[in-house]
Image: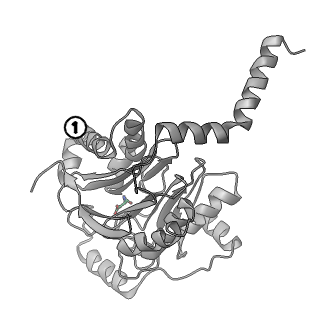
Amino acid sequence: MKTRRQFLQNSLLGAMVAGSGDLWAKTAGFFERPEKGALPVVIATWDNREATAAAWQILSNGGRALDAVEAGARIPEADPDDTSVGYGGFPDRDGHVTLDACIMDEFGNAGSVGFLEHIMHPISVARRVMEKTPHVMLAGEGALQFALSEGFQKENMLTETARKAWEEWKVKSEYKPVINIERHDTIGIVAMDARQRIAGACTTSGMAFKMRGRIGDSPIIGAGMFADNEVGAAAATGLGELVLKTLGSFLIVEEMRRGKHPQKAAEEVIRRLARKYPKDAADNQIGYVVLDKRGRHGAYSLHPGFNYAIFQRDENIVKEAGSLFLK
Ligand code: ASP
């Protein structure tokens, strides 16, 4: 038999769950009113203006942030000239292109794929994992099987340029994953739509010539990307191992939850990882893009050279991020 106390607790919980949409809308609107003209907004790592434009197409027509970040991420995935994402990405040391991606929606749902081969749009597979399975992450062969069962086509992801780069690399076979020297363009993309819904995505072919089986930060929720509709979102690029060890995107969102501006939150997390891993931080690049519930943004990196694309107030621009270490 239920005690009166249990009954009260249950009915209170029921009322909270049933009314949570309203409650959320009221409190979010009250505490986190967007800055004037700040919505919608999308921000992506590196000069991914084509990606932010694709996202804007959706956002400016009243679309959902989730659709926008997926559409944005698909642009570099299909671009053969982008050697760090999807088709055309540099392979692992055995010559296989292996892909990592993750996505989150405004409800906190998440989906990801790691070590996925032969699929042009890992971000869309990640979305299907989120929407069609009881799981968050699928990897390797299982992820491929799932993608094929969802109607994705098996394709060759290794372009001639990437194959040549790999052949050249094999001459010395030097395994020195120094991110600052190689060109790294992992796309992390976060957005808020006109209805103040926040979503994020991240997709990459990972570190060039990595060990077979290596999975980086990009498909790991909280590392390569994290989105919390109450607070904001962040996404990373750079040495995945370092982002993984510090769960950087999650940490940035938590710093914002405690009241920090997106810029200050990114700076705090970059400083923190440099304090904890000084040698890795000195030799490698990490950059974050950040967005908060009010439509304010921030970006920061370890070393100079990290830029980002932001589409807001009808303007699609590239900005240079500040960095902890100076030239
Ligand atoms: N974060 C990616 C990884 O470690 C690499 C990159 O940003 O280029 O897989």
Report how many numbered discs are placed on residues in the image. 1
Say whether residue 231 is left or right of residue 143. Answer: left
Quadrant in which the C terminus is drawn:
bottom left
Front residue of 132 and 255: 255
Q: Is residue 201 above or below residue 96?
A: above
Residue holding disc 1: 275
* Res 214 quadrant in image: bottom left
The residue closer to the viewer here, 292 or 152, is: 292
Q: Residues within 10 Å of mark 1 (few under 14, many from 20)?
A: few
- Counting from the top left corner in percent of width and height, residue 77 is at 46, 74
Mark 1 CB in 8 Å range of ligand 1?
A: no
Q: Report x, y in % for residue 170.
A: 29, 76
The amino acid sitting under disc 1 is Arg
Whether residue 96 is visible to the viewer of this picture, yes or no, is no
Q: Taking the image as four quarters, which one is ligand 1 found in?
A: bottom left
Residue 158 visible somewhere in the drawing: yes
Rendering coords of residue 37 (x, y %): 40, 57
The quadrant holding residue 49 is: bottom left
**Residue pushed farthest bottom?**
160
Q: Is residue 167 left or right of residue 146?
A: left
If the image is split into quadrants, where does the N terminus sit?
top right
